Image (cartoon, rainbow, N blue to C red):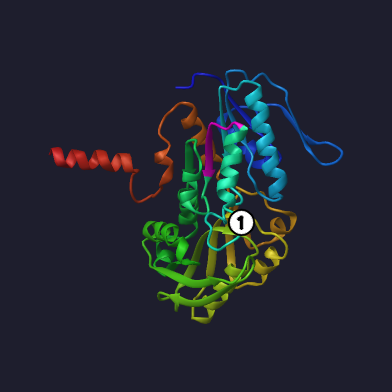
């Protein structure tokens, strides 16, 4: 068990989330200078004593990804050289995760490369949310706590969709790869599941082939881990509308939203797009009435507390107002068996 002082540092990737986590932990952000030399190189100075401390470094690889990744690596190196007892890289959004395998000649496996870089810089653990592919955990040679935003999102959306409204709701996965997360929502909302069958035609273009499941006359909640250009989401919403769907909503963990993405969302049939704050919204996204933010600060804050005290993080992986956590269910089942 780590008995050293908990210290929370942050780079420049997501200051609002860092401040919210610090509030949850009832602590102050530790002091560090993260700036630039005149030619643009990242410069870091740790202004507090970290020798023997249990350090948590919040720095995602959100846009601009290269700048933020270098901040993460250089801050980690600085903390290691200052003799921190343990460094946990808290990376709400793990970039470069879309290239997680060599699916054709001449392409890199960037997810593995970034995993190697974080480890080589000196991180002892990784804490992250909704990796693009779960197998990325295996690319690390250090412990990985892979949290899911779904419990937080479900908790919020159950306040939005009353039990009566859920009876007319269908959960939709925008591709085959997202079925597992969408099924989590479908089970918690106790409503049907449908799938949009799409084919990726390049880094920025996808082609929708078919809709599997009944959507006519149903309200729709599209569930996914990441939105980039918004083209796939807008296309899915349009084809669902053409198949007779009612109101269409979406909930997505990581709002990358580059270029014309916000415009694509705004012009689509979507009524509301809920996103988390793993990535801070840009000015256009903040001004878009359709985009609403659900914070994961408490989830990350609680995970940090549990990692620091060496208590289980698994209880954070699920949520339902209609059933107790897994540990309580196991106790209840054991009680019935004993009777």
Residue 35 placement (x, y as % from top left): 78, 35
Residue appearing at x 70%, y 38% in the figure: 71
In terms of image quadrants, where is residue 218?
Answer: bottom left
297 over 80 or under it: above or below: below
Residue appearing at x 43%, y 41% in the figure: 316
Q: Residues within 10 Å of mark 1 (few under 14, many from 20)?
A: some
| Residue 60 appears anywhere in the view | yes
Residue appearing at x 49%, y 67% in the figure: 175
What is the quadrant of the N terminus in the image?
top left
Q: Nearer the viewer, residue 136 or 248?
A: 136
Q: Nearer the viewer, residue 234 or 93?
A: 93
Residue 310 placement (x, y as % from top left): 44, 28
335 over 256 or under it: above or below: above
| Residue 92 appears anywhere in the view | no
What is the quadrant of the C terminus in the image?
top left
Q: Which residues are magenta?
A: 122-128
Q: Is residue 96 left or right of residue 322?
A: right
Q: Is residue 307 left or right of residue 44?
A: left
Q: Residue furthest front?
A: 105
Residue 276 placement (x, y as % from top left): 58, 51
Q: Residue furthest left?
A: 339
Q: Is residue 104 left or right of residue 334?
A: right
Residue appearing at x 33%, y 48% in the figure: 323
**Local secondary structure at mark 1:** strand
Number of callouts: 1
Q: Nearer the viewer, residue 139 or 317?
A: 139
Answer whether residue 126 is magenta in the image: yes
* Residue designated by label 1: 292
Residue 27 placement (x, y as % from top left): 61, 27
Q: Is residue 19 left or right of residue 144?
A: right
Answer whether residue 313 is magenta in the image: no
């Amino acid at each position: 068990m780590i008995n050293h002082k908990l210290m929370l540092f942050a780079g420049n990737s997501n200051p609002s989330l860092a401040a919210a986590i610090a509030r949850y932990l009832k602590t102050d952000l530790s002091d560090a200078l993260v700036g630039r030399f005149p030619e643009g190189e990242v410069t870091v100075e740790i202004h507090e004593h970290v020798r023997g401390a249990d350090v948590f470094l919040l720095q995602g690889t959100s846009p601009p990804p290269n700048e933020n990744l270098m901040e993460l690596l250089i801050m980690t190196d600085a903390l290691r050289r200052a003799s921190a007892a343990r460094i946990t890289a808290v990376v709400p959004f793990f970039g470069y995760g879309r290239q997680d395998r060599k699916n054709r000649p001449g392409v890199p496996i960037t997810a593995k490369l970034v995993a190697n870089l974080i480890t080589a810089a000196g991180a002892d653990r990784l804490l992250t949310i909704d990796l693009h592919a779960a197998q990325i955990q295996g690319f690390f040679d250090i412990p990985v706590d892979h949290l899911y935003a779904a419990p937080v999102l479900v908790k919020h959306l159950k306040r939005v969709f009353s039990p009566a409204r859920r009876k007319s709701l269908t959960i939709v996965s925008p591709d085959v790869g997202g079925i597992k997360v969408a099924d989590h929502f479908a089970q918690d909302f106790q409503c049907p599941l449908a799938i949009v069958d799409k084919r990726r035609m390049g880094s920025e273009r996808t082609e929708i082939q078919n809709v599997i499941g009944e959507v006519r006359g149903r309200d729709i909640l599209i569930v996914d881990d990441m939105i980039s250009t918004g083209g796939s989401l807008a296309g899915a919403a349009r084809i669902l509308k053409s198949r007779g769907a009612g109101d269409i909503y979406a909930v997505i963990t990581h709002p990358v939203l580059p270029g014309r993405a916000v415009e694509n969302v705004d012009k689509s049939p979507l009524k509301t797009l809920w996103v988390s704050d793993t990535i801070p919204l840009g000015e256009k996204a903040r001004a878009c009435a359709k985009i609403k933010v659900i914070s994961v600060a408490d989830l990350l804050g609680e995970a940090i507390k549990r990692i620091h005290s060496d208590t289980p993080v698994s209880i954070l992986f699920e949520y339902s107002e209609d059933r107790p956590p897994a540990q309580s269910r196991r106790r209840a089942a054991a009680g019935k068996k004993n009777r």
